[in-house]
Image (cartoon, helix red, strand yellow):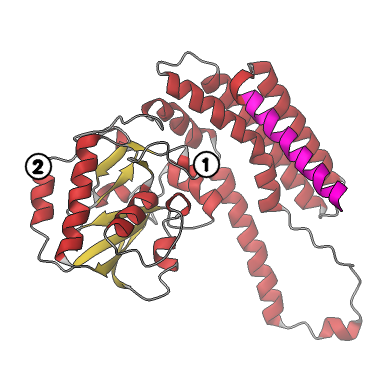
Amino acid sequence: MRDLVTERKFMSMIVWVVLLGMAFFGTLPIFILVYVFLAMLMIMRTWLGRALRRVKITTSLVYLLIMVLQITFSSAVIFRQHIYLGAGFFSRVFGTLLVLAPLLAERMLIIRQDTDFYLPSIKEAATLSFSEFNAQKDAVIHSVQSLGKVKQALAVDKLMPLFTDLKRHSSMRYINDGSLTQSYFDSVAATMADPYIYIVISNTGSNASELISLFTQKQYNHASLSFGRDLQTIISYNGGENVYPPGLNPEMVAAFHQKSDASVLVYRLATTLAQKQQIAAKIKQINQTGSAYNIIGLVVKRSLRPNIMFCSQFVYQMLRLSGLAYFTKADGNVKPTDLVELDYYKKLDFCYEIKFN
């Protein structure tokens, strides 16, 4: 048993050494060879498995699609002339992490069950109910829909805007400061009589949101804070929508309408005046010091500097800072839906939902 554990640790170490080698020293041919080799290996592994033939075909096509996207990204983004050193480094890191994409796809598409299969008797078959048939039908429909979402989120026209937007980001230095004007803070001051802070969870349909949903398997993938019920003071960490640099920015509810079924959920959390003022003061400090969107943190779950965060990380930090946090979790691991799903003590009150269709 110890030999087996030691061997697994040794193999894990080799994998990490290879990934680090690719990130720092890999050339374009090396990236392409690794992508192609892993795709072929996963396809062989799939066809040697016990899955249904149509599942094998679908999975193989997904592996090939991932390989094409990996090669496209490495050719068009990683090994091009970058204006910013940080963008070049991050693209190499992201390209290295893409090596793991086929493994994630396998986990999503294939469920292995180490059980023996046998044909049921006529008596056993006769006991099958219509509800069981319907349950299986729903499961198949759900699988097909999930596959469609994967294909849609990984479409080239969806990914390329994200890749080209990387040069605007920095996970090591503050690139956003002063995006919140005095007018914004005047609006915040006008809400201090309201004894609540508002937590906003949104399903926007943006390219980034759709990609994140593949990993979180959640419908709502953005979180914001507002000092007032009317959301005139809504704020969060975001990409800036090409108006502001990525980081701490004001938001507009209308900007959340990026697909026909986009929706926004608004919850309120009771707070004291002192707690609300503490959050406002911290936001003002971040606005003056500077901020950046923690795009690397979406993967590594860490921040390299205090004011570099992603949306749900920011919301949770503000709640914890003011003593309003109602669950305990490392801020880098907080997903937008955690803010609602982990409310075990029923601290939140649902206010309303916004639908755009």
Viewer-side residue, 53 vs 352: 352
The secondary element bearing badge 2 is classed as helix
Rounded to the nearest whole Å, what is the CA distance between mark 1 and mark 2?
Answer: 35 Å
Give me the disc on residue 300: 1
Q: Residues within 10 Å of mark 1 (few under 14, many from 20)?
A: few
Residue at left offset 40%, top offset 70%: 343
Question: What residue range appears in magenta?
Answer: 1-22
Q: Is residue 355 visible to the viewer in this orientation of the structure? A: no
Look at the picture and state if 12 lies above or below 223.
above
Viewer-side residue, 100 vs 23: 23
Q: Dot 2 corresponds to which residue?
A: 182
Would you say 175 lies left or right of 107 here? left
Residue at left offset 55%, top offset 31%: 94
Look at the picture and state if 128 lies above or below 287.
below
* Residue type for callout 1: Val
Query: Residue 156's spot in the image, x, y percent?
Result: 53, 33
Q: Is residue 210 part of the magenta span, yes or no?
A: no
